[in-house]
Image (cartoon, helix red, strand yellow):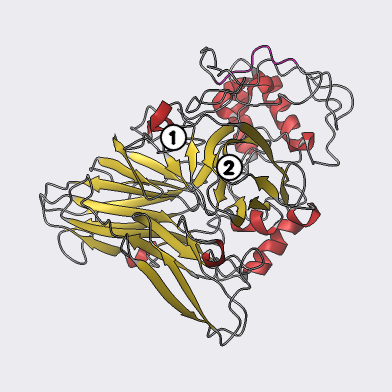
Amino acid sequence: LKEGQDAVLRVTNLLDESTSIHWHGLILPPEMDGVPGVSFAGIAPGETFTYRFPVRQNGTYWYHSHSGMQEQLGHAGPLIIDAAEREPIRYDREHVLLLTDWTFEDPMSVFRNLKTMEGYYNFQERTIADFFADVRNNGFSQTAEMRGMWAKMRMSSRDIADVTGSTYTYLLNGHSPQENWNALFKAGERVRLRVINGSAMSYFDVRIPGLKMTVVAADGQPVQPVPVDEFRIGVAETYDVLVSPEDDRAYTIFAEAMDRSGYARATLAPREGMQAEIPKRRQIADRGMEAMGAHGMGDMEGMDHSGMSNMEGMDHSNMPGMSGDDAGMEGMDHSNMEGMDHSNMEGMDHSNVGGMSGEQAKVGENGILIAGEAQPGSRYDQAGIGIDPNERRVLVYRDLKAFTPWPDRREPGRELELHLTGNMERYMWSFDGKKFSEVTGPIHFVKDERLRLILINDTMMEHPIHLHGMWMELENGQGELIPRKHTLNVKPGERVSALITADAEGSWAFHCHLLYHMDAGMFRVVQVS
């Protein structure tokens, strides 16, 4: 598409079931957003629906079905919008790299399997050999305590991804690693790679061994250049990077699944058919290893406390440091639980909650944190689980700085707090402990208000949270240059916030972009009026 023009897209449904197309990240009228049951009826078999909207932005986006499990079946593709005016970055050629996860199983069977057995697709569980290795490194009592704690939470420290390479083949532009899709360049050219994570469930760590990448856009919006060796891309996010290969040789574009169960790859090369060495995959990480240290379980990153909101049947009664009723969990000492916010829970000691690096939060006259400041309990300077920051330069959210300030410079007038909640064992996912089928009405934004959305992840999984129709300005501590995003990755136990200008009247979808999480209930409607 081209910025400044009116887009007219006629979609004819030749399937024997209803379908839809959502233009992910595009600012457009609600009836053109393509979410059946929210502000559009869907496209019935044999029907043609005309999407018509003004194109008011440029950059790298994508589109996908919002009907059933069609996105998992391959109904997704890139959407590139050319800028009306000359962009601030210069490049000689570009390639679009769409990452997806493919399974030959029926997606409904995948969903049933997840509901039947927690860890159904996880074939990288800890073994007796891992146990003895932990005993050697940490001693028997600490190892036994950790194992006992995970068992009590009925979870595995290796629950990194719900669906893994045991059923998925990871694709790049629809090609498996063996097919070796080629992106061509001439030595000395500057090449723009538009990387889109269009997968249903998979996060990827992307690198090109031998080439430095410069990140120049996030979620279609230009950012100040950040040189990196690797970046993690959450489901539904997009990153544009520049590379300048000087030599007449091939380079491997390597996109490793976050749980290390597989990878997608392509080759950047001067001629078709070339290939370079494929890096060795890293070992799966353990949840909690990063912060286990001397603090034991009190400081474990990524612990699932979803029982605090919705995890029925969990017994915390004899876990260290925990006492009393597990529903209210009063009397717990969280004094060392870095990055976890339980500020609205009674009876807890928050005297030492980390996340602000010792800085005092800057509070405005209305008693609300000043716009652009990072939330206490955010971890924007960490890439996430399984990444060693000493190994290579990895992009983190703290690095993202908008190219120019957002025009709406008002301080937020109010704050809206939502907890990301779930029950892994029963495979239920929700906001504030309620599945979409259990809520009575929409989340309400007042037209044109400036508000702060605070997301608190009470689960031990990452969640890519997507708001339709409006930008979210990620409060990553960059002041007036905080970046605009359409999808925010929230790490386990993390608290993140975004500023929103509610300028889009109508009803909008708001959900976790992990397809099976959304289908399990992590979905709400936002009403702007």
The magenta region covers 349-355
Q: Is residue 493 visible?
A: no
Q: Is residue 353 magenta?
A: yes
Which residue type carries mark 1?
Tyr
Label 1 Cα neighbours within 10 Å, binned few <14 / some 14-19 / many ≥20: some
* Rendered location of residue 267, percent (x, y): 27, 58
Question: Vertically, is 10 above or below 159?
Answer: below
Of marks 2 and 1, the one in the foreground:
1
Are the two marked residues, 2 and 1, in contact with CB atoms closer than 8 angstroms? no
**Frontmost residue, 257 versus 25:** 25
Image quadrant for the N terminus? bottom left
At 61% from the left edge and 52% from the top edge, which residue is drawn? Answer: 510
Q: Which residue is mark 2?
A: 462
Question: Vertically, is 115 above or below 301?
Answer: below
Q: CA distance from mark 2 to mark 1?
A: 14 Å
Dot 1: element: helix
